[in-house]
Image (cartoon, grey):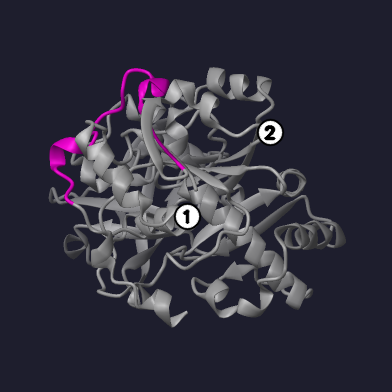
Amino acid sequence: MESVKKIQIQAYNYDLPDHRIAKYPLDQREQSKLLLCLKGKLSQDQFANIINYLPVSSLLVSNETKVVNARLRFIKTEGAAIELFCLEPETSQDFQLAFSSCSPVIWKCLVGNSKRWKNGLLSKGLIVDEKKLTMKAVRVDQRGDHSIIRFEWDGAGITFGQILDAAGDIPLPPYLNRKAELLDQFRYQTVFARNEGSVAAPTAGLHFTEEIINNLKNKDISFSSLTLHVGAGTFKPVSTNFIGDHHMHSEHIFVERKTIQQILDHCNNSIIAVGTTSMRTLESLYWLGVMIHKNPDIKNLHLDQWYPYESKRNLLFSARESLQVLIDYLDTNHLNYLSGSTALMIAPGYQCKIVKGLITNFHQPKSTLLLLVSALVGEHWKDAYHFALMNDFRFLSYGDSCLFIP
């Protein structure tokens, strides 16, 4: 494990000019370029043709999380603008329950222009279902880099999800350097987005259309989904010299029993993660199975960022065995889905247990997402990114895509 912790993040730096960052999506999702890195060989095509490059009988696993309108803007009476960025409910891990809750609710938030809001209520008028409402926010506590905010509003039966839909803005990545526009409400969501809870899109999924998904299914390529709610930590840069000093953010995951069974049934085939969030969840499933195998009565299903690197004695525990442990755990506890959290850091030196390939976008320099890609394909990531820069690929969230199969 020490060799992994001593990896220097500078080795995962590259020059990304601002004009190579896609500030807006293309007119059509499937028009994006597709960089192919198949066993180290590089080529390019259009994403619409990805079906031609996926192994027969593959299982694609996507993240069906949905981005919420997490940015709430308030104007104080003296004119100061305050932004509340909703991160997650303070207590409940059940995001669906949190969004269906009525007034009041308590959330963890980042506060923009915090110095201008020392105390008192923030107030904002809005319209929900043609009814005029007033929403209020008060800071209950300050904890490190985030605040605990209590929201309340008038209007019986109005849920917090409805409040965010009416009053919030879609939280675009900071590197786009622009405000959210009407098109982002549609284009910064995947076509399979279903479960509200993310503050950033699982961007590899943005290239898929219903037609592409149907074509995949018609060619004996299966499609499944899970949920990892993408947190603001996804944009947190690695600011330490060594990755061992970087604190990896934790994110909530939800995986239905039928999805785990489908993954188990495809263990002998190619399991392709649609995006880094899907890959992180799939690999976390293996280690959660190991944890339950060691402690069947475990209550808190949380995977620490370094757990896999400390568990060499479990290397002979197969993916099939681990997934079966999860199935048995759910059946024993009469559960339809697995709920937990993961802070897993996938970095060079990590050996993938479930994932055999990855569809992903191009990521920021010196990011943990680049470490993840390198863990799968080694130094080929450098060749791929150089190829992309030399061939006018568009980078980051609204940019082009890659298919990595080692």
Q: Residue at x 22, y 66 (%)?
A: 118
Image spot of residue 329 (x, y percent):
80, 62
Tell me the quarter of the picture where residue 323 sits. Answer: bottom right
Number of numbered discs visible in the structure rendering: 2
Whether tag 1 and tag 2 are in contact, CB under 8 A, the answer is no
Dot 1 alpha-carbon crowd within 10 angstroms: few under 14, some 14 to 19, many 20 or more: many
Image spot of residue 372 (x, y percent):
43, 57
**What type is the residue that disc 2 sits on?**
Ser
The residue wearing badge 1 is 376
Image spot of residue 108 (x, y percent):
42, 61
The residue wearing badge 2 is 57
From this view, report whether residue 118 is shown above or below residue 380: below
Query: Closest to the observer: 42 or 397?
Result: 42
Give the residues in magenta.
15-38
Query: Closest to the observer: 335 or 18?
Result: 18
Q: Residue at x 86, y 62 (%)?
A: 332
Q: Which residue is drawn at 62% across and 59% down?
A: 353
Q: Which of marks 1 and 2 is nearer the N terminus?
A: 2
Name of the residue lying farthest toward the bottom = 2
What is the C-alpha distance between the residues marked 1 and 2?
Answer: 21 Å
From this view, report whether residue 153 is shown above or below residue 292: above
Question: Helix or strand or loop: what does disc 2 sit on?
Answer: loop
User: Is residue 229 in view?
Assistant: no
**What type is the residue that disc 1 sits on?**
Leu
- Indicate left or right for 256 with 215 as reference: right
Dot 2 alpha-carbon crowd within 10 angstroms: few under 14, some 14 to 19, many 20 or more: some
From this view, report whether residue 23 is shown above or below residue 113: above
Question: Helix or strand or loop: what does disc 1 sit on?
Answer: helix
